[in-house]
Amino acid sequence: MSESDADPTERNRLDEEESPYLRQHADNPVNWQPWDDAALAAAEERDVPIFLSVGYSACHWCHVMEEESFEDEGVAEILNENFVPIKVDREERPDLDSIYQTVAQAVSGRGGWPLSVWLTPDGRPFYVGTYFPREPKRGQPGFPDLLENIADSWADEEDRREMERRADQWTDAIAGELESVPDPGEAPGEDLLGSAADAAVRSADREHGGFGTGQKFPQAGRVHLLLRAADRADDEETAAEYREVATEALTAMAEGGIFDHVGGGFHRYTVDRKWVVPHFEKMLYDNAEIPRAMLAGYQVTGDDRYATAARRTFEFVEREMTHPEGGFYSTLDAQSEGEEGKFYVWTPAEIRDAVGGGEWTGERVDADTAADLFCDRFGVTESGNFEGKTVLTISESIPDLADEYEMSEQAVEETVEDAREQVFEARAERVRPRRDEKVLAGWNGLMISALAEGALVLDDGDRWTELAEDALGFVREHLWEAPDGDGETGRLFRRYKDGDVAIEGYLEDYAFLARGALNCYEATGDPDHLGFALDLADAVVAEFWDAEAGTIYFTPETGEELVARPQEPHDQSTPSSLGVAADTLLALAEFRPDDEFADVAERVLETRGQQVRSNPLQHTSLALAADRYARGSLEVTLAADDLPASWRDELAARYLPTRLLTRRPPTDDALAGWLDDLGLDEAPPIWAGRGARDGEPTAYVCRNFACSPPTDDLAEALDWADDGA
């Protein structure tokens, strides 16, 4: 055995990892280690602190810190000699990220990436920060100086005792913050939705759209809260205000710089209040959750801008984020050629070259006029809005351009679209941002849900059905170990990359994927998707549910033991996994004869009830789950082999919050085969006695044990629900 094999920290081991983010650091002179038993044992053996650096592939300041410090031989020497440096991809290990972000928030009031944490050899934190510059700057210590100070303090007996005391205090605080469960109370009632919507209105930026007065994040959950509350409001004035705040946010996103107007898809957030300049990375989860909100907005308002934004986002995901076998990749970087946003920004000259450089097929105007129209439409100017170039935003309306150029609105719209296609082709010649090609189970679940909803709402729904089902099949094939037999539950892994499967799934993987599988069943009527959703829910209860505490933890009971076992009640960049789990369990409870799923969800909502009532905007997903619990699902049971076109039109056009669309064969004989495949001894109430009448497709719409008469007129049944079911 060589010396370097005996001590793994004598070399950089990240070239052995599958994470693209970790591989980006494989050539650093820092002897980076993955988070594994070998690295942790080496820290104990050497009796030196761990320097933990957490980031992700598309993180801009992670790249900056790498260039400034981790590629520097002098910094590497300090790190290698005095620490065990460990790199973690937060997208692979959200459990570690959650634990140490909690420390950062508690100590400094802020977190983020890169996250820099110094740990005792057994993993207890004693110093924390985010990005540190190479040289002292704006009150921040220079990174090399900080490393030397920490190393010197660790070597001093008295200072080290103080570090150990601080580590004990912080570890206790982590456990208290992440593991504590409130005393159970009452689950929120139907009044929660209105109070949550009122809170969203108070937080709204009524001038520029969205929420807050600084950087603008998507906040898709708040849009769902507002639209649902508007649908439920007793008076039209209140409903109108809720709708206005929701649609102001949707319009700002559909027209602002957070949306890629050339190629589709959404960037992470904007750095300004006016939704102009984005942080340019594209995350799979944003390109799932924002379109879901857009589709809801389209159903409520009929505004084609929202449907177009959703459709073009799906086209982007299909084109640029899809594995050849069906799963979805994780992220696109913000940078190309070392510059943030370079792939996405334009000058007027570049637009003229793009529009006039190829074969211009427009018959209405010449290429120069088309370029001018495009620049006016999307605000492309000589001065620009981002480092001398322009992030595209909708800057002039089609009617105003029609007046200005003395053209019909249709001609303007068609000309701008032709020009956009030319610009898209020109952009394809640029150096593309780097893509993180790991496939994550949970993020795929979010995307599958969005596509399944698009399959129901958009006129090209079959395309999105196929994409959703392909992804679901990919995850089932590569990341799912089916249960062996009766009493066993399946096992889900989190990450697939180049044939390598790793990391036991977290709650978000099971919950998001279960919801995606359920939504796929709603869109297709394939009971195999429903069966998979039920299997995932069984695993959630078996591995993550703690009946004594009354909560669903983020990590599985049989998972790695860390300094704390986190929960995720808050919505962050992704929905709360606890909230999605509760909501999905409530929906799936309709298909199980026992009450286990419903009981688990009820206990969670009782435990978190006061927190949700006190701060619904921090707990948006739990608030939506609580509303389903209080209001009940709107059960739309359709007994038919194939849905009539008129039914599909109704489902596309109707905004139906808490909808549970359930399909079943028209006859009980055919249903018996489904029940056998699903392991059910008898038909659940949502299917029992709800066959086709007189051999014709039949619809049943129910809520809280009250049902419309069986009918072949779905619109009539849905009207019954609107009238107060």
Image (cartoon, rainbow, N blue to C red):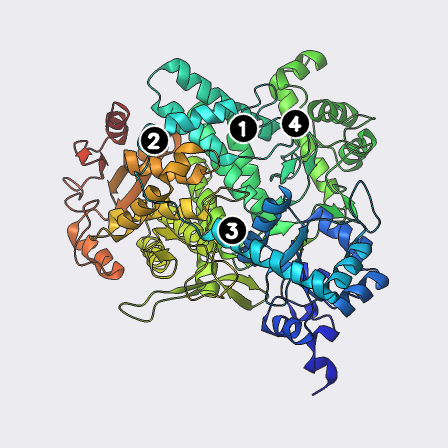
Q: Looking at the picture, which amino acid does disc 3 mark?
A: Trp
The residue drawn where x is 65% and y is 76% is 45
Residue hosting label 1: 250
Q: Is residue 74 visible to us here?
A: yes
Ranked by sequence position, the earlier of labels 3 and 2 is 3
Quadrant holding the N terminus: bottom right
Q: Nearer the viewer, residue 150 or 131?
A: 150
Residue hosting label 4: 273
Tags 1 and 2 in contact by the CB under 8 Å rule?
A: no
Quadrant holding the C terminus: top left
* Label drawn at residue 443: 3
Residue that sits furthest to the front in the current view? 158
Query: Which numbered disc, 2 or 4, marks the residue closer to the eye?
Result: 4
Q: Looking at the picture, which amino acid does disc 4 mark?
A: Arg
Q: Looking at the picture, which amino acid does disc 2 mark?
A: Glu
The residue drawn where x is 36% and y is 60% is 539
Q: Nearer the viewer, residue 320 or 415?
A: 320
Q: Say above or below: 228 vs 110.
A: above
In the rendered view, does 189 fall on the left or right side of 230? Answer: left
Q: Position of residue 642 (x, y in %)?
A: 29, 44
Instruction: Using the rendered view, name the quadrant where residue 459 is placed.
Output: top left
Query: Which numbered disc, 3 or 2, marks the residue closer to the eye?
Result: 3
Q: Secondary structure at mark 2?
A: helix
Neighbour tally class for label 3: few under 14, some 14-19, many 20 plus, Cα within 10 Å = many
Tags 1 and 3 in contact by the CB under 8 Å rule?
A: no
Q: Secondary structure at mark 1?
A: helix
In the rendered view, does 497 fall on the left or right side of 536? Answer: right
Q: Say above or below: 388 vs 441.
A: above
Q: Position of residue 111 (x, y in %)?
A: 63, 45
Ranked by sequence position, the earlier of labels 4 and 3 is 4
Instruction: Using the rendered view, name the quadrant where residue 557 is placed.
Output: bottom left
